[in-house]
Image (cartoon, helix red, strand yellow):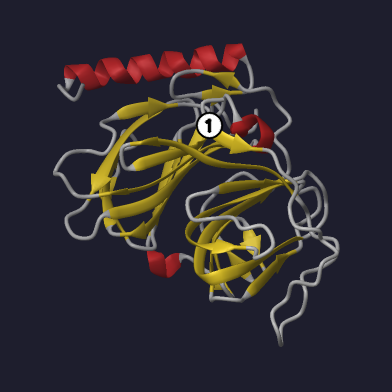
Amino acid sequence: MGQTATKIRSWDPGLDIGLPGRPALPKAARQIVFRSAGRRHGPITRLVSPSDVGEMIKPFVFLDHGEVPFTGTPLFGIHPHSGIATLTTVLQGGMAYEDTTGKRGKVKQGGLEWMKAGKGVWHDGGPLEGDPLRFFQLWIALPEHDELSPPESQYIPAEAVEQEGPVRVILGQHGLARSPIRAPDGINYFHVRLKGGQQWNYVPPDGHTVAWLSVDKGSLNPANTIREGELAVFEESDDAVAVQAIGDTSFVFGSAIKHPYPLALGNYSVHTSGEALARGEGEIRRLGDVLRVMGRI
């Protein structure tokens, strides 16, 4: 896989590990079946790729976590995608963006960049001056009916991200809080911030058998610690997920109905079939020819 990974079993869900004055974790909590510290590339850690952990947790097929200082140059350079949506969560600092739907601007701390590539798009971005850009970037594999749809981008400021308790709702819904992003159904993705000793119990919607989390700062679960920078994948089931913070902790969490399609992989694309991949990559090449004429690549 190219990952530093260990398959494990989580804490015994029957243990009472609540702190004094706090309830114990629920006895039907899911166990962890996989964890990884990923693979580091300079200031960025690749935690999930479509060819490895992405198969376990699809529609979540890619995850990067990083902290990148301002250098005056783009983070990745202008590059294409098709068949997926990319979602960048800005945890610190800010980023500039530009895409071939015609949008450009800035996303500040707490904001979101959603790029539904669909049949094909190119985009670019990089850190703004000031604090280093700390972020998670996630790829979502689009369903068959959406993978060749027209591209659409949304850039969400921090104040438009709704919150329920410690949960900022990035995709989907939690309690009364709902994401403003027009994402496929059956996917929840949250940014959760807990105080030391605080517990968070999540009862998934029907069919959300996929669940995972990745710790940004701090750590979780005294009986079997998930440390800063780690990814943990929970067993596929309908049970609740329960975690407890060791000190102040920030993490992202995803749950979903499992993507039922095979993953047809290109360099920057994920589709449900070879035929759809060929169509997406054809549109990427067409857009690339336009960008070359403009002197962009």
The residue furthest front is 223
In the image, is residue 72 above or below residue 291? Answer: below
- Tell me which residue sits at (64%, 61%) in the image: 173
- Front residue (pair 178, 44): 44
Q: Position of residue 251 (x, y in %)?
A: 52, 59
The residue wearing badge 1 is: 3
- Front residue (pair 252, 149): 252
- Residue 253, image quadrant: bottom right
In the picture provided, is 271 more to the left or to the right than 23? left
- Tell me which residue sits at (66%, 73%) in the image: 199
- Tell me which residue sits at (23%, 60%) in the image: 131
Amino acid type shown at disc 1: Gln
Per the image, label 1 sits on a secondary structure element best described as loop
Asked if residue 178 shows in the view, the reply is yes
Q: Quadrant of the C terminus?
A: top left
Q: Position of residue 18 (x, y in %)?
A: 73, 76
* Mark 1 crowd level (few <14, some 14–19, many ≥20, 10 Å Cα): some
In the picture provided, is 127 more to the left or to the right than 142? left
- Front residue (pair 230, 194): 230
- Front residue (pair 158, 137): 137
Q: Quadrant of the N terminus?
A: top right
Asked if residue 145 shows in the view, the reply is no
- Tell me which residue sits at (82%, 61%) in the image: 13
